[in-house]
Amino acid sequence: MTQYWSLCINLQGPMQAWGVESKLTFKSTSLAPSKSGVIGIIASSLGIERNNIDYLSKLSQLKFATVCLEKKPKFILKDYHTISDVSQCNGKIKDTELTDRFYLIDWHFLAIIEGDNQLLEKIKYALQYPKWHVFLGRKCCPPASPFIYKNALKECSIEDLLSINGDYLCYKETNITNKILNSKSEFDDVISYEDRTFSKKTYFEDRIDLIKLQDTIFPLKEQKNAILHEN
């Protein structure tokens, strides 16, 4: 009998940016954490180099899902950012270029990965004691809370964790390549981290209840204040 294990990772911060469709001077963000971005956090925590293709491929094979812990959409910030020494199509270098960058402001997500228990235990430890700096998509986006909270490692599959219908938006990784109802497709399937090349991956959209995830979610600010007030 196959044993399924899943690890729940809190992604909470004042700013997040998950660029799956970014183009040159236009740096957009997905409305949910990308698998490539979360694998990047894990790799950085483990101290895995970008050119370690074998280990990164192993991480990329983990099954993936995200849950948005906000019932209502929050604020998205558009920021103007100046970059220097910009390469142009004609081979020349432009001194400066103005770019548009978008950020999710004060959002909270759970990313869930499914795989071998031994590997997930190693990842859990690394996320608690990361070897390198970690950030939520871009270097200007530090996490505001620990990635791991209480019973983050579960002896069950992602499908089991997300099996109860509810109000919270989630995206589940699927191997279906064609466009399907209630789904999104993004450039999130890693071809090479070293060359930063990606192909499209499809995610199935669903609405779930948090009952099986409550003991993995780091308390939000208002919840922590309520706990302190009760004590």
Image: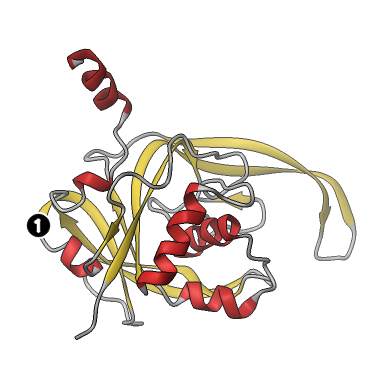
Residue hosting label 1 = 165
Which residue sits furthest right?
Answer: 92
Residue shown at 21% from the left, 71% from the top: 181
**Where residue 140 sits: x, y (%)?**
61, 39
Residue shown at 30% from the left, 65% from the top: 6
Looking at the image, residue 105 sits to the left or right of residue 231; the answer is right
Please tell me which residue lies in front, 144 or 126. 126
Please tell me which residue lies in front, 39 or 33. 39
**In the displayed structure, would residue 34 be above or below residue 218?**
below
Placement of the N terminus among the 4 image quadrants: bottom left
Residue shown at 63% from the left, 65% from the top: 48
Looking at the image, residue 194 sits to the left or right of residue 42; the answer is right
Judge whether residue 217 can be spotted in this image. yes
Residue shown at 34% from the left, 35% from the top: 74
Looking at the image, residue 160 sits to the left or right of residue 186; the answer is left
**Where residue 205 sits: x, y (%)?**
24, 63
Residue type at the position of mark 1:
Asn
**Where residue 144 sits: x, y (%)?**
46, 34
**Where residue 227 sits: x, y (%)?**
22, 22
Q: Quadrant of residue 178?
A: bottom left
Judge whether residue 191 can be spotted in this image. no
Q: Residues within 10 Å of mark 1 (few under 14, many from 20)?
A: few
Placement of the C terminus among the 4 image quadrants: top left
Q: Colour mode?
A: secondary structure
Which residue sits furthest bottom?
Answer: 1
Looking at the image, residue 219 sits to the left or right of residue 213; the answer is right
Please tell me which residue lies in front, 196 or 93. 196
- Which SS class for mark 1? strand
